[in-house]
Each structure stands twice: as structure tokens, then as C-alpha cells.
Amino acid sequence: MDLSLSAEYQALQAEIRAFLATHGHKSPKVGGGRKRPDQKTLDWQKTLLEHGYVGRTIPTEYGGAGKKPDVMEAAVIASEFARANVYAGLTNQGVSMLVPTLLEVGTEEQKRAYVGPTIRGDIIWCQGYSEPGNGSDLANAQTKGELKDGFWVVNGQKIWTSSAHYADMMFLLCRTEPDKPKHEGLSYLLLSMDSPGLDRRPLKTMTGRSEFNEVFFTDVKVPETQILVGRGKGWYVANVTLKHERSMIGDAGKMTARLEQLIKLLSVTEVDGVPLIRQAEFRDRLLRLQGEVIAWKAHNLRLLTEAAQGIESGVKRMIVKYGGTMLGFRLSSLAVDALGSAGRNDAGRKRPSYRAGCRGALPPTPPEGAALWAPAKGSGPWNRLIWLGVGGACSMVATNEQAPPTPNQ
Ligand SMILES: Cc1cc2nc3c(=O)[nH]c(=O)nc-3n(C[C@H](O)[C@H](O)[C@H](O)COP(=O)(O)OP(=O)(O)OC[C@H]3O[C@@H](n4cnc5c(N)ncnc54)[C@H](O)[C@@H]3O)c2cc1C
């Protein structure tokens, strides 16, 4: 197997390295993503757009670089930014989920209105799918949209809406055809979060942060044209978006960084004077996880090879969300076990509890500041990865979806 890059991609690699050497110092911190981008992040995004390192394949008329899709180019760019530990651009729900949806199914007017401002970070989106009575059973959404005098009048409630507390717009799944079977009764609307009658209420999670919200709609008016594809086509559009959401959630690139953090954590955490990494139970779990991370990387290289050859990976690609989040779960579980009571949900944000709650004789201060609390810089405490498997479809449901059809189906 020859894993070396061809001359064409080596040239791209050299170009990116030169860019990073000149401009890399202007990059914001890697990570974040759960707050509104600040000016530094927006300026950096603009620089990346100008050089074609984000929005690379988006047509120029919508604000991208207009290059032809090339999975190897994308992989080289991602790997060079990761290698230099430089922020590779916004990956929020608008950029990673709505923009590809608009490019796939949006009207010309919708693409022109939203793609450019979204990839620049000027419009922040949130996803209005889940409701108190429907999560995995997404097609059962009950929030109503009634067409009256040129407007969709929306009433109901969404929940677990990430980023809604600072988002400008929402892509919303609502029931517009109550008389039709449930999958045919939904529509997909684009609406302003400042619409009169819309009320956002942040929810505090077990990590102590507020990254989710409840969103209430009371006679919220959405112009009739703010619909994607058409009436009753919401289930189809929602699944176009979910396809992109699930690839984003199971990102393989982060696993190696998390494993490295875990190795450091087990090396500096001692019980009875012995680092956990030297204790059989922890060492055994760590070695198994190391094997899994290597296998996960190999799986992703296989997908990359297939994509480069134009092969449709089917079920092999669908396991990315499930496999990635479950591996994240196991890595995080080992970290939380090592941290003992200091690994409790809110401890990652409180430095004093690092010492007060630790199970063993830790150094007086965390050797690398608070970094060991987070699996990758800025990506939140270990605990967050434990429940990330729920996002974008619970793992059990994702497993069902991935089962190959039987001959009778
Ligand atoms: C980090 C994160 C971010 C999120 N962001 C958003 C967002 O921005 N917008 C949004 O709309 N939603 C968001 N969600 C919500 C998420 O999409 C839902 O939590 C998810 O779809 C599951 O729905 P539920 O919580 O109602 O659980 P339920 O559907 O009630 O599931 C509860 C349990 O029952 C099991 N179960 C359910 N149905 C089946 C079945 N058919 N077969 C086997 N087992 C089953 C599940 O596996 C699970 O264990 C987010 C969630 C997380 C964790």
C-alpha cells in the first residue's frame, strides 16, 4: 500500500504550509463552536474563504471558491490544519448542514440569499427538529404551520435546540398537512429567530453549560416563500440535512487527539504512587481503545479511498456517526473513571476541584493547565462526549437504520 501523496497534492500541501507559516498566527483558538463567532474568528474565516480553504467547492456566485470537488484536496487541507493546530474554519449547523442542503435542494434565490452570509459567519443557524414528544421519532413532529394570507403561521414547541440563544435563523420542521400520513405531512421552513411570537429559553445541561434551548412559537409568521422544496416535502429535506449532520458528528480526525489526551491523563494520574497507565485494568482498557482508534482511522481512510474513486460507500459511511460517538463514549468513560469524583459533570470548569476531588496523588496543579479536562482543546469536558451519541439520532436508533435490509423488505 502506497500512502504517499501524488505530486499534485504535494504541491497543495506545500502551498498550505506556506499559507499557515505566513498567516497561521491570526487564527483563533482551535475548538469553541458553542458560542457566537467573535470578530477574530470572522476575520480568519474571511481569510480562509479568500484562499479557498473553506467553501472550496461552493460556486463563486454563492461566495465560495468554485473549485471542482476533490476529496483528496479536502483531506490534505484538513490534515495540514490539524497538524499545525490551526482553526480550520466554522463548522456550525449552518455551514456544515444547511449550506449543503441548500446547494442540493434550494432555489436559486435561497442559495443566493443564504449560502454566502452563512459561510462568512454573518448568519448563524439553529436546527428546529426535536420536540418534547418526538426525538428519535422525528417524523412525528407536531409543531404546526398553517398557511394564511401568504404566511406560514407557526405554533408549537421545539427542544434541545443547540445555539438557539444566539442564532439568527432556524431551519424548522413543522406539520403543514395534518390530514396526510405523518411522513408526508411535514414542511421545512427557514425563519428569523427575531420573529414576533418566538421565545427562546436556554436549558442548563449536566455539564453546567447552556448550549441547548427550548423554543416556543405563538403565531409566528413566516413568509410563504421561506419553504425548502415544497409543501409536504419536509421529511425528504430533513433527511438531506441529517446526512450531513451525521458525517459531522462522527468526525474521525478528533479521535487521535482524544486518545493522546487520555494517555497523558493516565500518565499523570496516580493511585498509591503508581500512574494509572501502569495499572493493569486501566492499561488494558487503554490498549484496547488504542486498537479501536487505529481501526477507526483505517475505516475512514477506506471511505476516503472509495470517495476518491467515486464509489458509493453505503452502510460503511452510515456507521461514521454511530461508530465515532460510541468510540468517543468509551474514551470518555475511561477518562471519567480515571478522574474519579473530579470527573463529575461540572468539574471540568472548576479548577480547584481538580485537586480537591482527585482520586490519587496528583501533581499540585494540572501539568498542562486545565487542558486534560478536555479531550481536545476547547471541545468541552469529557462528560460531554458521553452523551453526544444522542445527537443526530440516538445510537440505538442509528443501529437500526444501519441494519442491511432483509430479502423480504
Ligand atoms: C449534543 C446534542 C445536540 C442536539 N442538538 C439538537 C438541535 O440542535 N436541534 C434539535 O432539533 N435536536 C437536537 N438534539 C436532540 C436530538 O436530536 C435528540 O435528543 C435525539 O433525536 C433523540 O431524541 P430524544 O432525546 O427525544 O430521545 P428518545 O427518542 O425519547 O429516545 C430515548 C431512548 O429510547 C431509544 N429509542 C427510541 N426509539 C427507538 C427505537 N425505534 N428503537 C430502539 N430504541 C429506541 C433511544 O435509543 C434512547 O435510548 C441534540 C441532542 C444532543 C445530545
Image (spheres, grey):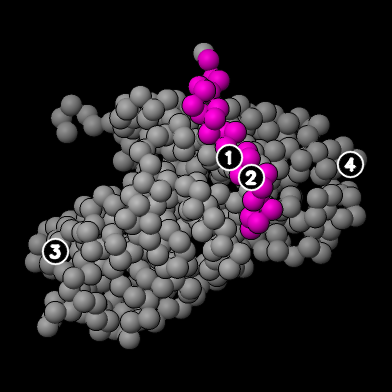
Note whether 184 is above or below 113 in the view shown: above
Q: In this view of the protein, which residue sits in the foreground, 134 or 233?
A: 233
Pointer 2 and pointer 1: residues touching (CB < 8 Å)?
yes
Q: In the rendered view, does 65 fall on the left or right side of 18?
A: left
Q: Which residue is mark 2?
A: 20
> Alpha-carbon distance for marks 2 and 1?
6 Å
Could you tell me residue 182's position as x and y percent? Answer: 17, 59
At a point 48% along the width and 74% down the height, the residue shown is 165
Q: Compare marks 4 and 3 and give the one earlier in the sequence.
A: 3
Q: Compare marks 2 and 3 and give the one earlier in the sequence.
A: 2
User: Disc 1 marks which amino acid?
Assistant: Ile
Classify 10 Å Cα crowding around label 4: few (below 14), some (14-19), many (20 and above): few
Q: Secondary structure at mark 1?
A: helix
Q: Compare marks 4 and 1 and give the one earlier in the sequence.
A: 1
Q: Compare marks 2 and 4 and give the one earlier in the sequence.
A: 2
Q: Which residue is mark 1?
A: 16
User: Which region is colored magenta?
Assistant: 2-28
User: Disc 2 marks which amino acid?
Assistant: Leu
